[in-house]
Amino acid sequence: MRFLKPSDEDVEEMLPIDLALLLMTLSVLAVWALLGVLLIGLLLIFKALQSTRGWVEKVTMGVRAIEHQMAPLDEHADALVASLDEAATAVLAASRRVERLARELDAGRTP
């Protein structure tokens, strides 16, 4: 069996669509496909950013709650420092008395 090569005129008759129109249509489809891929990529990035935003909001809410709970401690911290200062003074006085008593006991004297 032998195949015959069609003539140029036969080829033109078999292709009812203009080649330029075909190429333009394929180009438009390629551009739409590219835009679709870009849109899908941007949506995936947007979803990831939304998830990150949710976590950051939760962390911020936790930090604010801690700040709210710690606010009264600031007022009490000054009182605590003052009472610790008084306690340190009392402990220092007591340690001096114990040292004096220890020296007297070492020297053989009774108080």
Image (cartoon, rainbow, N blue to C red):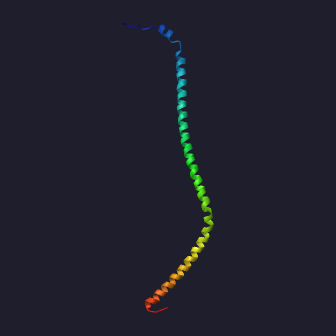
Q: Is residue 58 above or below residue 9?
A: below
Residue 85: x and y in percent read 57, 75
Task: State left or right for residue 32 relative to residue 109.
Answer: right
Task: State left or right for residue 65 relative to residue 104.
Answer: right
Task: Tell me the quadrant of the picture where the N terminus can be found.
Answer: top left
Q: Quadrant of residue 40?
A: top right
Kindly give the residue lying farthest to the bottom in the view shown: 109
Q: Is residue 60 above or below residue 107?
A: above
- Residue occupying the point 45% across, 89% down: 105
Q: Quadrant of residue 93?
A: bottom right
- Residue occupying the point 48% across, 10% down: 11
- Residue occupying the point 53% across, 42% down: 48
- Residue occupying the point 55% across, 43% down: 49
Residue 26: x and y in percent read 52, 22
Kindly give the residue lying farthest to the left in the view shown: 1
Q: Is residue 17 above or below residue 88?
A: above
Q: Nearer the viewer, residue 65 or 41?
A: 65
Q: Quadrant of residue 81?
A: bottom right
Number of numbered discs overlaid on the protein picture: 0
Residue 82: x and y in percent read 60, 73
Q: Is residue 38 above or below residue 60?
A: above
Q: Nearer the viewer, residue 104 or 42?
A: 104
